[in-house]
Image (cartoon, rainbow, N blue to C red):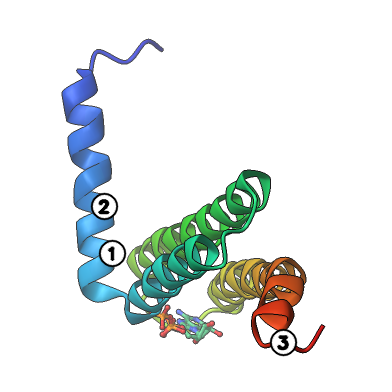
């Protein structure tokens, strides 16, 4: 089925989703702040553009999984306000997606920052 929604409506809904999630989800705010700090650190240590691009991809991955986690949580709360085994599986899997993205992002950041930080500290 072809959607008749205007582009401005599509962007408007997406923007509302971001604002609502930022207002209500503490973990998302932490991830956005961490992402900003990582980009500032990458600029400070003058990482190559390719490394900065990789960091941006990882930051986007974490923020997107966090947004999807919020979407799944809300949908599950709507469908299953009471305790249900499948609701637990859905929410736990969504939370696990954020955790995996966050862990891999930290590993990528450590690999990319290791050499420049050590050299800045005069340790190599
Ligand atoms: N309806 C439910 N049925 C079964 N288990 C649930 C249900 N709601 C929540 N849980 C369990 O509680 C955990 C926490 O769920 P909750 O909705 O409170 O998310 P949260 O961890 O507080 O997320 P966030 O902090 O990102 O808002 C879930 O991962 C799940 O294990």
Q: Position of residue 87 (x, y in %)?
A: 53, 73
CA distance separating discs 2 and 3: 45 Å
Report the quarter where the N terminus lies. Answer: top left
Q: Position of residue 21 (x, y in %)?
A: 28, 64
Number of other residues with Cα within 10 Å of mark 1, as a class: few under 14, some 14 to 19, many 20 or more: some
Q: Nearer the viewer, residue 3 or 14?
A: 14
Q: Nearer the viewer, residue 64 or 46?
A: 46
Residue, disc 2: 17
Residue at 24 percent across and 13 percent down: it is 4
CA distance separating discs 1 and 2: 6 Å
Q: In this figure, what is the number of numbered marks?
A: 3
Which of the 4 quarters of the picture holds residue 6?
top left
In the image, the residue with mark 2 has its CB under 8 Å from the nearest atom of ligand 1: no
Residue at 53 percent across and 59 percent down: it is 59
Residue at 67 percent across and 45 percent down: it is 50
4 displayed left or right of 108: left
104 displayed left or right of 7: right
Q: Position of residue 123 (x, y in %)?
A: 77, 89
- Going from N to C along the chain, the mark reached first, 3 or 1, is 1
11 to 53, vertically: above or below: above
Residue, disc 1: 21
Residue, disc 3: 122
Residues at discs 1 and 2 in contact (Cβ within 8 Å): yes
- Going from N to C along the chain, the mark reached first, 2 or 3, is 2
Which of the 4 quarters of the picture holds residue 9?
top left
Residue lying at the far front in this picture: please name it: 122
Residues at discs 3 and 1 in contact (Cβ within 8 Å): no
91 displayed left or right of 15: right
CA distance separating discs 3 and 1: 42 Å
Number of other residues with Cα within 10 Å of mark 2, as a class: few under 14, some 14 to 19, many 20 or more: some
Report the quarter where the C terminus lies. Answer: bottom right
Q: Position of residue 121 (x, y in %)?
A: 66, 87
């Amino acid at each position: 089925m072809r959607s008749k929604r205007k582009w401005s409506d599509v962007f408007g809904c997406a923007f509302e989703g971001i604002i609502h999630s930022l207002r209500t989800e503490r973990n998302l705010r932490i991830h956005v702040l961490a992402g900003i700090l990582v980009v500032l650190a990458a600029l400070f240590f003058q990482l190559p553009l390719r490394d900065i691009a990789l960091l941006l991809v990882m930051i986007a991955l974490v923020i997107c999984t966090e947004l999807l986690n919020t979407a799944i949580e809300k949908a599950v709360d709507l469908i299953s306000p009471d305790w249900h085994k499948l609701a637990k599986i859905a929410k736990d899997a969504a939370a696990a997606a954020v955790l995996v993205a966050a862990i891999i992002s930290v590993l990528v950041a450590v690999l990319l920052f290791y050499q420049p930080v050590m050299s800045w500290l005069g340790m190599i």
